Image (cartoon, rainbow, N blue to C red):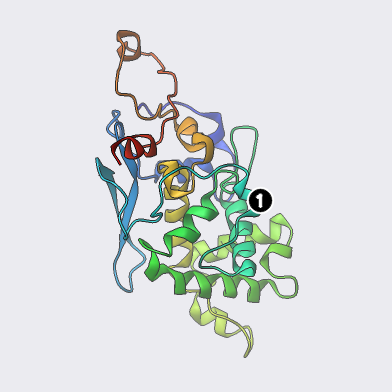
Amino acid sequence: MKDNHHPALETERTIDRRRLLAGASIVTGGAIAAAVLGPETTLASGNEAARPVIWLNQSPTAASPVASPGATPVADLATYIPNHLTEAELKTLKAVLDRIIPKDEYGPSANEMGVFIYIDKSFGGLHADALPVYQAGLAGLDSIAGSGGFAGLDADKQDAILTDLESGKQDTTESNTRGPNAVAVPVSFFGMVLTHTREGMFSDPIYGGNVNFQGWDMVGYPGIKLTWTAEDQAVGSTPSPEHISVAKYREALS
């Protein structure tokens, strides 16, 4: 996959698509082709660093973010009931995701791609150890924001808080100076959310994110193609998207 010029990656947002896409766990040259289920991230204990791995030719297991096959329907976005976060925590998380990847003329928002569903469901398996970090981080954001919580702030104030958080200004020490009732934001929180946002946007829809294959369309990945025509392989060609989830082949083999 070529690193083509893309005007959507040249915005001046604090957290923009260029940085998100540049760090996404997507390999070049079409190697994310047949049977990609999605990225697995191994979190080291006490370390926010993650090791991305692309699963090939595997079925989800009990350790996978989602145990049941099938992509998440768009209709579920508005009515989704969290499995692991509370409704209040989910509201704050969605506000964060709306600032990391908001909807614009170049593409859908992270929430429209179901990233919040991917993240919440992943706490039941792959990212179970991350749940306490999220709970503390989301509570910390609401504490910083004050009355109304983080979701109640306008976009500029949300961006300012996230910018401080990304740069390390809202660390545990500074959080504790805001008063006896302040909640500390874990240092690893922002980087963890950013990593999981990438995963939710670009992994196979079987995991709850990448709704309607919008993430794959954004980066020009055509999806699973078992047959590549001469036209598909021609220099400079743009293969038409297949929009096929690996769930199709899991169901055929079950």
Residue 109 in percent (x, y) is at 60, 44
Residue located at (41% from left, 17% from top): 238
Amino acid type of the residue that numbered disc 1 sits on in the rendered structure: Ala
Q: In the picture, residue 63 is in which quadrant? A: bottom left
Quadrant where the C terminus is found in the figure = top left
Total numbered circles:
1
Look at the picture and state if 80 lies above or below 56: below
Classify mark 1: residues with Cα within 10 Å, few (<14), some (14-19) or many (20+): few
Residue located at (69% from left, 61% from top): 157
Residue located at (40% from left, 41% from top): 204
Q: Residue furthest bottom?
A: 180
Look at the picture and state if 7 lies above or below 251: above
Residue 174 in percent (x, y) is at 55, 79
Residue 143 in percent (x, y) is at 64, 76
Viewer-closest of 253 and 129: 253
Q: Is residue 62 left or right of residue 83?
A: left
Per the image, the residue denoted by label 1 is 78
Q: Secondary structure at mark 1?
A: helix
Q: In the picture, residue 124 is in which quadrant? A: bottom left
Quadrant where the N terminus is found in the figure = top left
Q: Residue furthest front?
A: 254
Residue 35 in percent (x, y) is at 30, 36
Viewer-closest of 35 and 219: 35
Look at the picture and state if 31 lies above or below 122: above
Q: In the picture, residue 245 is in which quadrant? A: top left
Residue located at (38% from left, 35% from top): 248
